[in-house]
Amino acid sequence: MAELTTIARPYAKAAFEYALGSQTVSEWASMLDFVAQAVSNNDVAAVIGNPALSAEQKGEVLLKVSEGQLTDKVENFIKLLAKNHRLEAIPAIKDRYEFLKANYDKAVDVEVTSAMALSDEQLQRLTEKLTAKLGRKVKIETQVDSSMIGGLRIKAGDMVIDGSVRGKLDKLSETLRA
């Protein structure tokens, strides 16, 4: 996995810089997402992993599957990836591209886990507070986990804020054992 991430970085950066220059950042994101989903399809993955096919043939198959969904520039990008035997890195390239786009947009995805479903008012207040704290636009995705008893667990990138009752009880238990 680390290898694919390493391979993906320069390609994602190049794609992002091109898209930024041509003011097509969102369009490229959508097209890369489409191609990443296609590559993740079992049938397409089998073709890409087939050693009997040339790199160009694999690229043509992917382009045929994506026909009508991609611009000429993205098709050229796919051909380059095929030529360099990097088609399997497309999902990692898409992920890295999304990361670059989020940084450019000054946005962050936040996972909020709570013991009970949050009301619209609670979500609005939480969004405002997290936007102020993180200095970015916040997109909240919520989950309910009744084992938390109460409170919230917030995850934004590598930052985790555990304000759950379960988390506090676990900390207390750990302190008492020490």
Image (tube, helix red, strand yellow):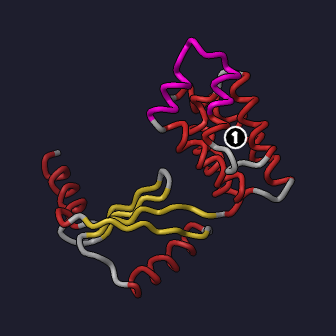
At 41% from the left and 62% from the top, the residue drawn is 111
Please identify the quarter of the rendering in which residue 108 is found: bottom right
**Closest to the observer: 39 or 172?**
39
Residue 153 visible in rendering: yes
Crowdedness near tag 1: few (<14), some (14–19) or many (≥20) residues, C-alpha within 10 Å? many
Residue 113 lies, in percent from the top left, at 32, 65
Circle 1 SS class: helix
**Image: magenta residue range:** 42-61
Residue 3 lies, in percent from the top left, at 56, 25
At 75% from the left and 47% from the top, the residue drawn is 16
For mark 1, what is the residue?
12
> Was residue 58 drawn as part of the magenta stretch in this picture?
yes
Q: Is residue 55 left or right of residue 163?
A: right
At 42% from the left and 79% from the top, the residue drawn is 123
Please identify the quarter of the rendering in which residue 155 is found: bottom left
**Closest to the observer: 63 or 10?**
63
Q: Is residue 95 left or right of residue 40?
A: right
**Closest to the observer: 27 or 169?**
27
Vertical arrangement, residue 18 with respect to residue 47, above or below: below
Vertical arrangement, residue 86 with respect to residue 132, above or below: above
Amino acid at pointer 1: Ala
Residue 11 lies, in percent from the top left, at 71, 35
At 53% from the left and 44% from the top, the residue drawn is 37
